[in-house]
Amino acid sequence: MIRLRSLSKTYASPAGPFHALREVDLDVARGELLSVVGRSGSGKSTLLNLIAGLDRPTSGTVHVRDRAVHDLVERELAAWRGANVGVVFQFFQLLPTLTVVENVMLPMDFLGLRPRRERRAQALALLASVDIAEQADKLPLELSGGQQQRAAIARALANDPSVLVADEPTGNLDATTSASVFALLRRLADRGTTVILATHERDVPGLDRSVELRDGALVPTAMVSSATSGSAIAVATS
């Protein structure tokens, strides 16, 4: 589903070049739930942004479903991202003046892949799938943090993307709510969505795999314990 080769990103700064990512090689399979762990500044968000086409690499390649994302021009990139990638932000990014269901309908309105008369019904179905259908006609600030995050996930799924990237999706949630969000991401992966999340947490339940970034580079291959089965799984790195 996703193939990264020699992926690097360098930003200019007053102190000189900042190497956010360094020569990353990574393959992610369809329906895999993968976590990217590391400290703040390790390159997690940069990696997700490059996969989602929200940023461009300095060098290297990004292929998603055999599409060379790094070669797309801006107009192509926006259309490709809307149809193929859902993005979940740490701070939800729901528009406060729109109801929850209207927020979920926005990506459908942007791409126009679904007839207008079907969009509300689809948005309500997505909200039901994340267990907050009863909140559909409320404004985001009337919801709890966990409910807002679920609404953000529903919005990310509006155009049935094959890939979902989530940047610290539980960073502002309590332990119980975090567990329910992780369980939801596991269910999405089980349905065939490739899910990649950046997190500080190392004991995420239901993962297929975890990789660690340190100073923009993947750490050497290690063995970690599966949170669900207790079996050993390899951390795939370059």
Image (cartoon, rainbow, N blue to C red):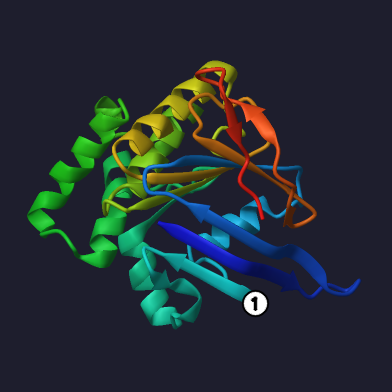
Residue denoted by label 1: 59
Residue 131 in picture, x, y percent from top left: 30, 25
Q: Is residue 106 left or right of residue 140?
A: left
Vertical relation: 28 (above or below) 3: above
Image position of 227 with respect to 6: above or below: above
In-front residue for pair 185/65: 65
Q: Residue at x 30, y 62 (%)?
A: 83
Would you say residue 201 is visible in this rendering? no
Between 22 and 170, the one lying in front of the other is: 22
Amino acid type shown at disc 1: Ser
> Would residue 216 be visible to someone looking at this image?
yes
Question: Residue at the location (67% across, 33% down)?
Answer: 223
The answer to which image quadrant residue 188 occupies is: top left
Q: Check disc 1 and report its element: helix, strand or loop.
A: strand
Residue 218 percent coordinates (x, y): 71, 52
Callout 1: 10 Å neighbours few (<14), some, many (20+)? some
User: Which residue of the protein is positioned furthest toward the right in this rendering?
Assistant: 15
The residue under the point 36% across, 63% down is 65
What residue do we see at 52% from left, 66% from top? Answer: 54
The x and y percentages for residue 136 are: 27, 34
